[in-house]
Image (tube, rainbow, N blue to C red):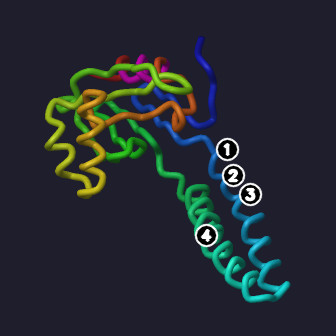
Amino acid sequence: MVRVSPAISREPDRIEVRAPRAAPMATLAMSVVGVAAGVWLLVSGGAGNVVLGVVLLAFFGVGAIRALLRLVKGRALLVATPDGVDDGGSVVAAGFLPWSEIGTIEVLPGRGGGMLVIGVRDPEAVLARTSPARARVGRAQAGRLGSPVVLPPTVLPVPAEELAADLERLRP
């Protein structure tokens, strides 16, 4: 069964996967409530209230800004073409991977559904293109799951099995 999702577009020679908008919308709503509570504490006075109000404003203000940026920017999690896959959704955000660098495409069981694992032939070459912090996480992930390029079910708008089949059909 193929599920239709506005977060995924399928064309004959291109697949584009975007993150569901529910998570940033929920974060934005919670952040607005947190900012309002911070303002209320600041206005109500008292040294303890002012300190807590400032902390709430800083924490939830940053959350609101990040959520708004995710809603407005909305970078694709994954774009696949006959040339390769552009990864922006895994923890390493590997960027463009030509099909020649990709080995297997697997779905491993995970909490909440399957994890899409895009096996790369040379993980260290992929990790060299990322920041040192992302590379550390990617190495740990590659040790556990076989590749640093993993999209968990929490970010995928469709089942990983469905997306893996789409990728295999697009692979030359």
Q: Which residue is mark 4?
A: 59
Q: Which residue is mark 3?
A: 29
Side of 136 relative to 19 (left or right): left
> Which tag is nearer the camera, tag 2 or tag 4?
4
Name above or below for residue 58 compared with residue 22.
Answer: below
Q: CA distance from mark 2 to mark 4?
A: 17 Å
For the residue marked with disc 1, what is the amino acid? Ala
Q: Are marks 3 and 4 in contact (CB under 8 Å)?
A: no
Q: Secondary structure at mark 4?
A: helix
Q: CA distance from mark 3 to mark 4?
A: 14 Å
> Which tag is nearer the camera, tag 3 or tag 4?
4
Among the 4 quarters of the image, the one containing residue 120: top left
Part of the protein shown in magenta: 162-167
User: Which is nearer the N-term, disc 2 or disc 4?
Assistant: 2
Q: Residue furthest right?
A: 44
Q: Residue 152 at what x, y percent from top left?
A: 46, 33
Q: Are marks 3 and 2 in contact (CB under 8 Å)?
A: yes
Q: Which residue is mark 1?
A: 22
Q: Which residue is mark 2?
A: 25
Q: Are marks 1 and 2 in contact (CB under 8 Å)?
A: yes
In the image shown, does 74 or 112 lie closer to the viewer?
112
In the image shown, does 140 or 90 lie closer to the viewer?
140
Among the 4 quarters of the image, the one containing residue 150: top left
